[in-house]
Amino acid sequence: MSYYSLPQIQTDAQKVPCTTLLPLPHLGHLSGNPAQTLEKNTSLSLPLWLAEMLLIAPAPNTPAAITMDLPPPLQHRVVNALKANPVTLDLRAQAPHFYALGARMLELFEDEDLVEVLLETFRTRAVEIADRASGGVGGRAAGDEGGFLLGLEDGEKRLWEASREGSASVGKWLAGLGKG
Amino acid sequence: MSLGDTSQKLIESAARISSLPTLPPYATTLVRAITRESRDLERDIQSLLSPYRSQSSQSQTPGGDTQFKSSFNPADDPALATTLMVNHVTLRRNKRCLLAYHRTRIAHLEKSLWSGLPLTQSSSAPSNPSSQESNLTPSESLLASSLSSLYSQLGAQYPDIDLLGSITPPREVYVEIRVLREVGEVQTEYGSLVLGKNSVHFVRLSDVEGLIRGGVVEVVGEGG
Amino acid sequence: MDTDISDILASVSSPTVHPHTLDLQALTRAWVNERSAPELLPYPADLIARVSGRLSAQILKIESLTSTNNPGLKSTLVIYQTELERVKFLLRSYLRARIAKIDAYPHHSLALPASHLSPLEKQYTTHHQSLLSTHYHTSFLSAFPASLQRLDDTTGGVSMVDRPDEDTAVFCRVLRDCGGVDVQGTEGTAQVELRRGDIWVLRWRDVRGRVEEGSVEMI
């Protein structure tokens, strides 16, 4: 459900750091200065849906208008924190649709390391979610119950809800069997 | 103007809708602002391209619009090409956000329509989501009643299965019900029931599901 | 000889399953498959026609038994009606599951092979989309340039035609041996054999053909 998907649309609104490669008259408003030319080598934040298209050169042998860098939620500082301990990081505070953002950026950048980190982060946190959903207290995060759950990003929240509902449904069904 | 800010607000508004029991008011101001911005963007595109157009390169689109061929070559003016791209991409973004917003509202409506319709085809006019009437635009109201007819027509094509009925699995065939609100005579598939206030009846669940949902009767016990 | 050879054989062979039961089993399987598969499955027109026909007949039978007002028939009637409700539910839930998928992927559904949509479903979808399109145009779409007024535009950055995710993981049971499937792991690709009785979690795209032909069922 990509075109009409609200999470997808919201992900594409994420701002990414860009740098202009040529002077752009008419586009001063993109950096908050309408009626001015957007000069070459200006740094600015653009939403992903716009930046992505400006990466494409307007014609063969013509330069693209901008270059783009990874947004803050996927920069080294965060990646290193995830490598150290994927469970304690508040992913939601980084980006509400953290993995979707990662997936989108990986459509534009090759970054094997980032792929590995995201996969490992997802796996580890998913195990933690499943464990808690079935009534366990979790692994490393015992004593920090509320923190982990509040830090779940969008997809993880749905995973949590589905796991809880699944656990509860099975419990109800088993209890129903007992009644004969 | 910060491009796409208004569209962003509309999407945030849409994201809240699914968790609400009834449709909130339509975001008229936001929709109008985005529509206006879109008209402006297209007008800007056309005026930026006008130096590159000539009368002799007119053509008719299938829709009857006169379309001007433009001789603009992006390689000649990358900065202009970029401006055109920004406008065009913003137009597409606005379209996407507007569609997603409207579709979210429609999905909410459709869900109500599928679950709120009366059980037997012989009942009177389908219930309107009347508590939401004031929050629907005229176009949405029209759509709601057209959809209601469409679903009824579809249901009529499968006469025996009550297509619009409950999709939770049947538990018991019969239930004992007490009438909470006087409704008088009610038609069922096999005859009529007279539902006087406080009267108790042992009836088929499928005959009274709609009345249970609507709070007209309550289940006292279940039978086999 | 008075008796045909095939009659003798029939009397000593194992009891066959009643065709009504076979149909009910097939409907149940179609119901589970349809609810679990991400894509719309082919419409089993003959099966649905037979089950619907039998349903109508059953309703008439119950009506006539009810009208005799014979108290001795009460438990029989309850059994008939329980069965009736079950079949009605199956059909209803099955058709509604299909409609939900069609509503989610209307343009994709209309482009599927003719075997996948019943004529009624096709008619419903076309009408449904037309109502939505009118609504969108009235509400805002007519303000956009003609080239951007389509609802099935695939040329922008994101295609407007949503389609189900073929890589969705599905749980399935193998009904008869049906060959190998390539599975991607972290170390590379390997092949797994689908043998009768196996239960697998696989990508939908790898089992779609086998589900449609009946070698594999969803669970």
Image (cartoon, grey):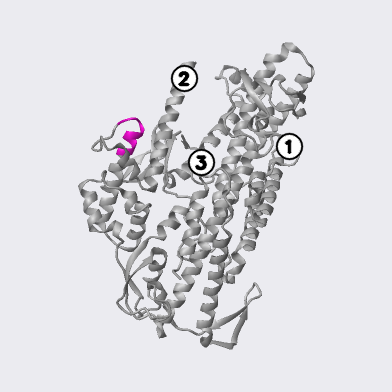
Give, as a three-letter code, the residue at label 2: Leu
Counting labels gives 3
Q: Are marks 3 and 1 on the same chain?
A: no
Q: CA distance from mark 3 to mark 1?
A: 37 Å
Position in image of residue C75 (x %, y %): 67, 14
Q: Residues within 10 Å of mark 1 (few under 14, many from 20)?
A: some
* Separation of residues labelled 3 and 2 (CA atoms): 35 Å
Residue type of the residue flagged with mark 3: Glu
**Point 60% across, 84% down: residue:** B58
Residue that numbered label 1 is attached to: B121
Q: Residue A1, percent across and down? A: 48, 52
Q: Chain of mark 1?
A: B
| Amino acid, disc 1 | Gln
Foreground of the two, B180 or C211: B180
Marked residue chain, label 2: A
Rendered view: C210 above or below B192: below
The chain under label 3 reads C
| Magenta highlight on residue A134 | yes
Give the residue drawn at x 75%, y 36%.
B123
Quarter of the figure with residue A13: bottom left
Give the magenta range.
Answer: A128-136
Mark drawn on residue A177: 2
Mark 1 secondary-structure assignment: loop
